Image (cartoon, rainbow, N blue to C red):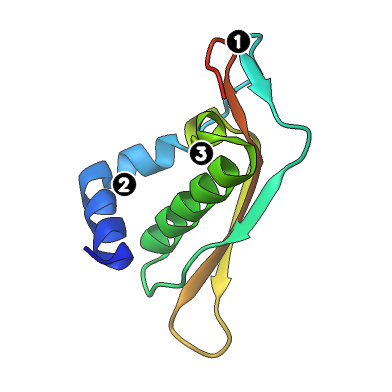
Amino acid sequence: MSKWITITILFLMAGGAALASQFGGLERHAYHDCSAARVAVFGYGNRSEPVAELAAIVRWEEEAAEKYGNSFGEWALAQDRSLKCKRWRQTPYRQCKIAALPCKPKDTDL
């Protein structure tokens, strides 16, 4: 299954409300271990901004897991999150830049 099909299916399953909740304010809790550096990536472009946002989240999770281990690859646990989307060049596509501090629950091993 192509990455685009997977992203589209995930978006449809998650729904807009679930995506919006990903950007709610999580406070830094004592039960999180966070990396020392933020991970920042550009997501794949899409005509739909919500799909572009989801693509950026998926890409961020992959990058964070690759750099710090699978336990750190969960956007919902990340701290100091930022997401900015803009039109890509002169095309109808939107591209998002996403950055956050990867975190994991303290009781999870790398």
| Vertical side of 79 occupied by 8: above or below | below
Q: Earlier in the sequence, mark 2 or mark 3?
A: 2
Query: Which callout, 2 or 1, points to the residue nearer the camera?
Result: 1
Tell me if label 2 and label 3 are in contact, CB under 8 Å. Answer: no
Mark 2 or mark 1: which comes first in sequence? Answer: 2
Query: Looking at the image, is mark 3 or mark 1 earlier in the sequence?
Result: 3
Badge 1 marks a residue whose secondary structure is loop
Q: Residue at x 56, y 32 (%)?
A: 72
* Whole-percent x, y for residue 29 in the image: 64, 13
Q: Dot 2, crowdedness within 10 Å: few (<14), some or many (≥20)?
A: few
The spot of residue 21 in percent (x, y) is: 42, 34
Query: At 51% across and 63% down in the image, what residue appears?
Result: 43
Task: Identify the disc placed on residue 31.
Answer: 1
Of discs 3 and 1, which sits in the foreground? 1
Identify which amino acid the numbered label 2 is placed on.
Gly
Identify residue type, mark 3.
Phe
